[in-house]
Amino acid sequence: MISFSPKKFFQTRIFKRGDRSRKLSGSGGARLKKKRELEQILGIKIKNEDYFVEALTHRSALSLPSSDKKRSNERLEYLGDAVLNLLVAEILFDEYPELDEGQMTRFRSLLVNQRALAECAGKISLSYFITMSTSAQQAIEKGYETIISDAFEAVIAAIYLDGGIKAAKTFVRREVMLKQLQIDKELFKALDRNFKSALLELSQSRGLGAPRYNLIKEEGPDHDRTFTVEVIIGETRHGAGSGKTKKAAEQAAAEQAYESLKPEPPVPGEDQSESVV
């Protein structure tokens, strides 16, 4: 089992995907190095380490033999969820006046959900710093997203408590809005119209069955991936599209397929009815 002491968090372990955690010595220099590593990935200066010790303590660590029964990050996760939703809503309201209430709500749902936050945490390697049991670490390695998404929200709360709302807003804009989903025309198009739903309705109305989406290509570094998806209806490929997320790529493919299948509008001036003699 992994030894755990919240007070000595910055002297203990950094978790790495697919690898055993590595120990840092208990010297002051090693402790300072650990703190600086965390400051670097978060882009902040830490004043009160206790907030971040708690934010990065999973509840599984409290049951370890060496635990001194300090709090897990669950309370901070609760606060961080509220702060995150407020800041995303404020940024959308202030910086994107062209969005109406429904679009802002849908956009926020794309940005603030378990999978999106787990991806945010992955991009800054946050799991390296979470103190947890071996079984919890194995769950992360198998793709269990709750642990790291909750820790990400707890860290947002820690940044808010330690550095104020301005520091938290800077972090959220950079790590959630700009890096993760890269607010751009791709996603605005998805908000304006859900082409996947439109394509499903059109294909079913013609008796063609439900469209299927296949990921055919992934390219680019981990922090800047591009996905390409094709859409198949029946046995025929009707479109393909690319995007920075799989959802955006599916929307682009659905739009192409929808445009190829939708009825042609009548030619202006052409009489569509039969002439009556």
Image (cartoon, rainbow, N blue to C red):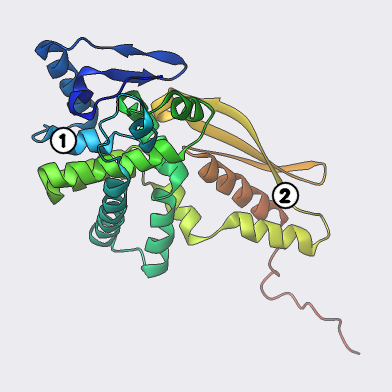
Q: CA gap, disc 1 to disc 2?
A: 51 Å
Residue drawn at x 56%, y 46% is 252
Relative depth, front residue between 160 and 166: 160
Residue drawn at x 82%, y 81% is 273
User: What type is the residue that disc 1 sits on?
Assistant: Asp
Q: Is residue 120 above or below residue 2?
A: below
Q: Is residue 132 above or below residue 248?
A: above
Relative depth, front residue between 142 and 194: 142
Kindly indicate the quadrant of the structure image that contains residue 26: top left
Using the image, tell me which numbered label, if any, was put on residue 211: 2
Q: Nearer the viewer, mark 1 or mark 2?
A: 1
Residue 136 in percent (x, y) is at 45, 30
The residue labelled by disc 1 is 50
Q: Secondary structure at mark 2?
A: loop
Residue 95 in percent (x, y) is at 25, 56
From where the camera sits, is residue 173 visible?
Answer: no
Residue 209 in percent (x, y) is at 80, 54
Q: Is residue 1 left or right of residue 232?
A: left
From where the camera sits, is residue 165 visible?
Answer: yes
Kindly indicate the quadrant of the structure image that contains residue 149: top left
